[in-house]
Image: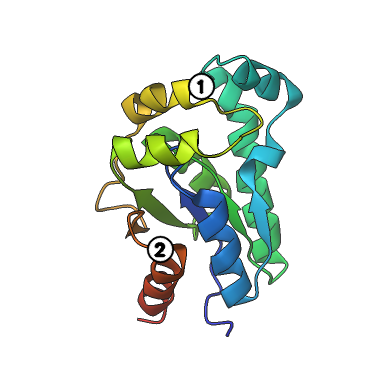
């Protein structure tokens, strides 16, 4: 069912379902999925595992790596889908500086629902305690950004179905 030929970032705070939605969307679109967490430098992983929020200096090499992966895959004719929080406009702009065609799929939802989901899972380096700082950091995408919104209260299957419909229009 390959309909999309655009590199995609599935964005949102930790616990919003980026990896789940990204992997399912990639499967439906027959594209490669990459979990952005795997692209973090080791120093970032150590900080996050210790419950230390990353700053912009920490994130810059990570975001550059993500942007390069998107650009390289698009140039090769096989755009990828990457899960990445992309919480700030400046982060999304940095990614777009590498690959201007990037579409951001923003997973949105309430703090309580996302917190419950985080508490129910085990994540290598994202404790529930960092949700508050992520929500404080989040800059909602603007109307001038290439973004689709998806509400996380729906099932993953419904979210992906809605995204596929939007991508086909």
Closest to the observer, 49 or 97: 49
* Vertical relation: 145 (above or below) 77: above
Q: Classify 10 Å Cα crowding around label 1: few (below 14), some (14-19), many (20 and above).
A: few
Residue 128 in the image: state x and y as whole percent: 47, 26
Query: Which residue is at 51% across, 21% downward?
Result: 56
* Vertical relation: 57 (above or below) 10: above
Residue 123 in the image: state x and y as whole percent: 61, 34
Q: Label 2, on which residue?
A: 155
The quadrant holding residue 20 is bottom right
Residue 18 in the image: state x and y as whole percent: 51, 50
Whether residue 14 can be seen here: no
Residue 41 in the image: state x and y as whole percent: 72, 28
The quadrant holding residue 57 is top right
- Which quadrant would the C terminus be assigned to in this image? bottom left
Whether residue 97 can be seen here: yes
Q: Circle 1 sits in a helix, a strand or a loop, which is it?
A: helix
Q: Nearer the viewer, mark 2 or mark 1?
A: 2
Query: Which residue is at 65% across, 70% downward?
Result: 31
User: Do labels 2 and 1 touch, CB within 8 Å?
Assistant: no
Q: Circle 2 sits in a helix, a strand or a loop, which is it?
A: loop
- Which quadrant would the N terminus be assigned to in this image? bottom right
Q: Classify 10 Å Cα crowding around label 2: few (below 14), some (14-19), many (20 and above).
A: few
Precedes in sequence: disc 2 or disc 1: 1
Residue at the left extreme, as displayed = 143
Say the numbered circle drawn on residue 56.
Answer: 1
Name the side, left or right, on which 72 lies relative to 81. right
Say the numbered circle drawn on residue 22.
Answer: none
């Amino acid at each position: 069912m390959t309909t999309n030929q655009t590199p995609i970032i599935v964005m949102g705070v930790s616990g919003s379902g980026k990896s789940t939605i990204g992997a399912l969307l990639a499967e439906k679109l027959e594209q490669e999925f990459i979990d952005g967490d795997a692209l973090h430098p080791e120093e970032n992983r150590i900080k996050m595992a210790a419950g230390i929020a990353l700053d912009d200096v920490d994130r810059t090499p990570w975001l550059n790596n993500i942007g390069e992966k998107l650009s390289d895959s698009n140039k090769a004719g096989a755009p990828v889908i990457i899960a990445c929080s992309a919480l700030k406009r400046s982060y999304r702009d940095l990614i777009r500086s590498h690959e201007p065609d990037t579409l951001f799929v923003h997973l949105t939802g309430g703090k309580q629902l996302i917190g419950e989901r985080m508490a129910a899972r085990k994540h290598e380096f994202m404790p529930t305690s960092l949700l508050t700082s992520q929500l404080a950091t989040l800059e909602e995408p603007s109307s001038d950004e290439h973004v689709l919104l998806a509400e996380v209260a729906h099932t993953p299957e419904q979210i992906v179905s809605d995204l596929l419909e939007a991508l086909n229009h």
